[in-house]
Image (cartoon, rainbow, N blue to C red):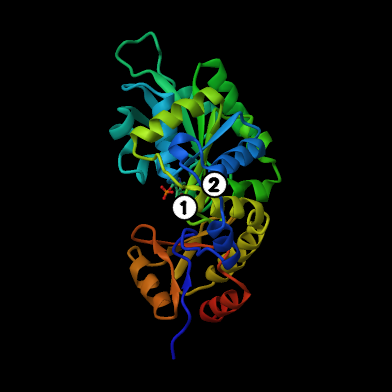
Amino acid sequence: MSYPIIDLRSDTFTLPSLEMRQAMAYAPVGDDVFGEDPTVNELEKYCAELFGTEAALYCTSGTQSNQIAINVHTHPGDEVICADLAHIYIYEGGGIALNSGCSVRLLSGDLGRFTAQDVLNNINNKNDIHLPLTRLVCIEDTVNKGGGAIWDFEEIKKIRKVCDENNLILHCDGARLFNALIETGISPAEYASQFDSISICLSKGLGAPVGSILVGSKAFIAKSKRRRKSMGGGMRQAGIIAAGALFALKNNVTRMAIDHQNAKEISAILKQHPLIQSIFPTTTNIVIAQTKKQDGALEMVEWLKERGIMCFPFGPDKIRFVFHLDINDEKMNQLKSVLLP
Ligand SMILES: *Cc1c(COP(=O)(O)O)cnc(C)c1O
């Protein structure tokens, strides 16, 4: 007998619903490189209003929106401060070096979260010509490699203050920002007031098929639009996909609380599993489990795969499960029946 597949490898595996596809099929479109796609314009306006920023830009991916932001905020030879677990450093193909020619100061922290004091301690003396100029601080909220950890908003405010006092720019890789906001209750606009720019993935737990949004000032977005073009990200009748993103923003945000509930439930069950040693604190939609064996990840991935469950090896002794809108009650029940002794 074969099981239906439960795909927890990532929250990017969501498929557009019938309603989303209908919204996409009937979306009014135009040439967005000429600024004439009404649906892309509506999406960008909707996001700017939601985050209380002057402007927004629809980008092809989260990597693209992060890389555009880093490029616009820096000059070659500048230094970027980020966590050692940061997606912009680990998973964007060396983009900081390749696209922007910047060096990186990696900070270790608590599940990918550093403090304002850490930032202060790592700003180079700008009068010492040996040292690269510290220009940009990037945080990631929630932290993918930190098991979906949420940043403390009070610490973010302190980091903002350090940035202001030291002439630094603050960017947020908010690929999963809505997961944080749903959990903390902080509004998108209040959160965005602390940053010069934020990138948000629409193609993860929100369930849109394609794209990320970059929000910031009018001047920043104007430069970003130019940079997006030179990176090959100018799209034509992009309203077809932007309609899916708009649908996701209007329908799939508050339901993320269900994903968090599901993740926490499975986290508690996995803790008891004979092959599992420990679990990262589970606060949003990601569960990272450490295996008892030092190289036990692949064995556990295979064990689960044979039972219809797909997860992602996250290093030799870690596996990652990501919960999303395609994991319904029926799949949760099946998952529990496999994991429970
Ligand atoms: C997924 C992700 C991104 C962007 O990824 P794309 O696949 O390029 O859309 C950026 N940062 C984090 C933390 C992510 O998880």
Q: Residue furthest bottom?
A: 1
Point out which mark residue 210 bears: 1
Question: What residue is rendered at 31% in x and 43% in y?
Answer: 93
- Residue annotated with mark 2: 142
Disc 1 residue type (three-letter): Val
Question: What residue is rendered at 37% in x and 24% in y?
Answer: 79
- Residue 104 locus on image (x, y percent): 36, 30
- Residue 305 locus on image (x, y percent): 40, 76
Give the mark nearest the N terminus, 2 or 1. Answer: 2
Dot 2 alpha-carbon crowd within 10 angstroms: few under 14, some 14 to 19, many 20 or more = many
Q: CA distance from mark 2 to mark 1?
A: 20 Å
Using the rendered view, name the quadrant where residue 304 is placed: bottom left
Disc 2 residue type (three-letter): Thr
Q: Is there a contact, CB below 8 Å, between mark 2 and mark 1? A: no
Q: Is residue 151 visible?
A: no
- Residue 44 locus on image (x, y percent): 57, 39
- The quadrant the N terminus occupies is bottom left
Q: Please determine whether, in this image, residue 213 is positioned above or below residue 105.
A: below
Q: Nearer the viewer, residue 36 or 68?
A: 36
Q: Please determine whether, in this image, residue 273 is positioned above or below residue 226.
A: below
Q: Is residue 32 visible?
A: yes
Using the rendered view, name the quadrant where residue 132 is placed: top left
Left/right of residue 277 with respect to residue 50 in the rendered view = left
Q: Please determine whether, in this image, residue 221 is positioned above or below residue 262.
A: above
- Residue 282 locus on image (x, y percent): 57, 57
Any atom of ligand 1 within 8 Å of the CB at mark 1? Answer: no
Any atom of ligand 1 within 8 Å of the CB at mark 2? Answer: yes
Dot 1 alpha-carbon crowd within 10 angstroms: few under 14, some 14 to 19, many 20 or more = many
Question: What residue is rendered at 55% in x and 80% in y?
Answer: 334
